[in-house]
Amino acid sequence: MNARVEAVMEMAKTWPTEDQAELLDALFGLVSPAGGELEAQWINECEDRCAAIDSGEMPLISADLVMAKYRR
């Protein structure tokens, strides 16, 4: 990691979580601009998954069970 990135990281570690999230969102926007086909596909995927959960077609698994499985 170069010195500029390290300096920003060290500063950001002292910020509130909300400010860190805002920085992350802004940086992600630099390398992956909003809009376009990929974002539309993700929106559709999220809507499809939510509908499957709401209808009972896709069961939910607790995070504790998932984490226990991968800790073995």
Image (spheres, grey):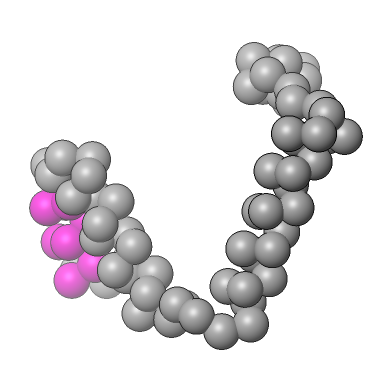
Q: Give how far across and how far down residue 49 sits, in percent.
A: 74, 47
Q: Residue at x 13, y 44 (%)?
A: 15
In the image as oriented, which residue stretches furthest toward the right?
Answer: 57
Q: Toward which corner of the image does residue 7 lie, by quadrant?
A: bottom left
Q: Residue 48: x, y in percent?
A: 75, 53
Q: Which residue is at the front of the view, 10 or 29?
A: 29
33 sits to left or right of 59: left
Residue 50 visible to the viewer? yes
Q: Nearer the viewer, residue 56 or 63?
A: 56
Q: Main secondary structure of the magenta part?
A: helix
| Magenta span includes 7 | yes
Quadrant of image for the C terminus: top right
- Residue 29 lies, with reference to residue 72, above or below; the image says below
User: From the image, which quarter does the N terminus lie in?
Assistant: bottom left
Q: What range of the chain is rendered magenta?
A: 4-13
- Is residue 41 shown left or right of residue 58? left
Where is residue 65 drawn, in percent x and y? 72, 16
Residue 52, compared with residue 72, is above or below; it is: below
Which sits in the foreground, 40 or 63? Answer: 40
Q: How many marks?
A: 0
* Residue at the far front in the pictured view: 55
Q: Is residue 42 left or right of residue 13?
A: right
Q: What's the residue at 74%, 44% (across, down)?
A: 51
Say above or below: 30 vs 26: below
Along the line of sight, the residue nearer the viewer: 9 or 63: 63
Q: Is residue 17 above or below residue 3?
A: above
Residue at figure coordinates x 74%, y 23% from the top left? 61
**Which residue is farthest bottom?**
36
**Residue 13 in view in this figure:** no
